[in-house]
Amino acid sequence: MAAVIYGVCWTFRSNGVHRNPQSGLIPLAKGAWAWLAPGNSWGWSNAGLISDGEESLLVDTLYDLELTDEMLAKMRDAEPLANNIDTLVNTHANGDHCHGNELVCGAEIIASSASAAEMAELPPEAMAAIVAMAPDMGEMGRYFLDCFGQFKFEGITFTPPTKTFEGELHLQVGDKPVELIEVGPAHTRGDILVHSPKDRVVYTGDILFIEGTPIIWEGPVSNWIEACRRIEAMDVDHIVPGHGPITDKHGVAAVRQYLEFVHEQARQRYDAGMSAFDAAKDIELAEYSAWSDPERIAVNVDSLYREFRGEQAASDVFELFARMAALAGYDVATP
C-alpha cells in the first residue's frame, strides 16, 4: 500500500498501520515547523525545524538519505535559513532519527552523551546487513522486512554527534531560546526533549508515539512516565511526537497511561511466576489494541521483567523480534 507525498512514493505495511491525517512540512509558529511522516509505524519518524534571525536548528533527520533529502528540500523551499542549518539535534540514538545526519553539511550535531555512545552500536551498515540476511530467516525475517524493507540503508555514512551534553543544554536560535532536556534512559539510553518556549512548541522524539504503541528498549519505565508528566506540565501549544500526528496534553496522557497500565499488568504476572512472553500474550490490551504495532507489548514486558529482576543486560534483539512476529500473526516458533 502506498501514499504519494511531494512526488515521493512511501510504502507501508498494510496490517493496521495508522496514516497521519497530515504529513509533510507543517507550520506551527513563525519560524517553527514540524515534518510529519505519512504513517506512524516502524521507521516513519517525525522531525522539526526552528529558525530565527540568521540561524536555524533541525530536530532529527530521517531513516535514510532519500527521505532526509526530500525533507530538507521542502524545508529549504519554506525557509531560506534551512539552506545552511547551523545546528542539528538528535533526540535519541535510533537510526530513524539520525541516519540522515550526513546531509546536514557543516552543522554542529548535538545529542546526549548516552545517545552518542548508543548510536555507534547499530550503524546504518549493520541495518543493511540484517536486511540482506532477512530473506533467509524464515517468518521472522519476513516480519523484519515488512517493518524495515522499504528503507534504503546502503551507502549511508555514519555521522555521529560533534557535541554532547548531560542533563540540560540551553541554546539560542536567533532570539529564540531552545532548551534541550535529557529525560532518558527511557525509550533509549539518552532521550531528550527539544523545547522552544517562544514558539510554544516541544519536539519529544520517541518519548511520544501517538496512536502507535511505545516500545521500551531501555527503561526504567518510571523515567518515561516522568518525562510524560514533564511534557504535560509545559506551557506549549504544539507537541510534536517522534511518531504519529501532532498532539496535545490528552495525547501525552494516553501514552503515560499505557505505560502505567503495562507496568501494572506485567508486575502482576511477574509476581505470579509467568514468563515474560507468556505474560505478553496474556495481557488484554483493550483500547490499546487499536494502536499500531500492538505486538511491541512483547518487548515492553521483557524490559519490565528485566527491571523487576534488576538486570542490566539487554535481551537478544532477534529473540524479541521473533516474539513480536509471533504476536503479529507470523508463523514463528518461540520458546
Image: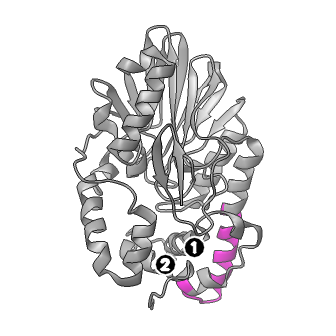
Label 2 or label 1, whichever comes before in sequence order: 1
Element carrying mark 2: helix
Measured Cα–Cα span from mark 2 to mark 1: 7 Å
In the rendered image, residue 234, in percent from the top left (x then y), is placed at 70, 33
Q: Is residue 240 magenta?
A: no
- The residue lying at 41 percent from left, 36 percent from top is 70
The residue where tag 1 is placed is: 295
Residue 290 x, y percent position in the rendering:
71, 66
Q: Are marks 2 and 1 in contact (CB under 8 Å)?
A: yes
Instruction: Examine the rendered structure and indicate whether residue 78 appears above or below residue 317.
Output: above
Instruction: Kindly identify the residue that appears in the image at 45 percent across and 43 percent down.
Output: 8
Q: Which residue is mark 2?
A: 325
Q: Position of residue 141 (x, y in %)?
A: 37, 76
Residue 183 screen position, x and y as percent: 53, 44
* Region in magenta: 259-277
Would residue 231 appear left or right of 113 to someone viewing this image?
A: right
Between 31 and 174, the residue placed more toward the observer is: 31
Query: For residue 270, what is the image quadrant?
Result: bottom right
Helix, strand, or loop for circle 1?
helix
Q: Quadrant of residue 25?
A: top right
Which residue is rendered at x = 58% and y = 66% of the image? Answer: 293
* Residue type marked 1: Glu
Quadrant location of residue 273? Answer: bottom right
Residue 218's place in the image compared with 243, above or below, is below
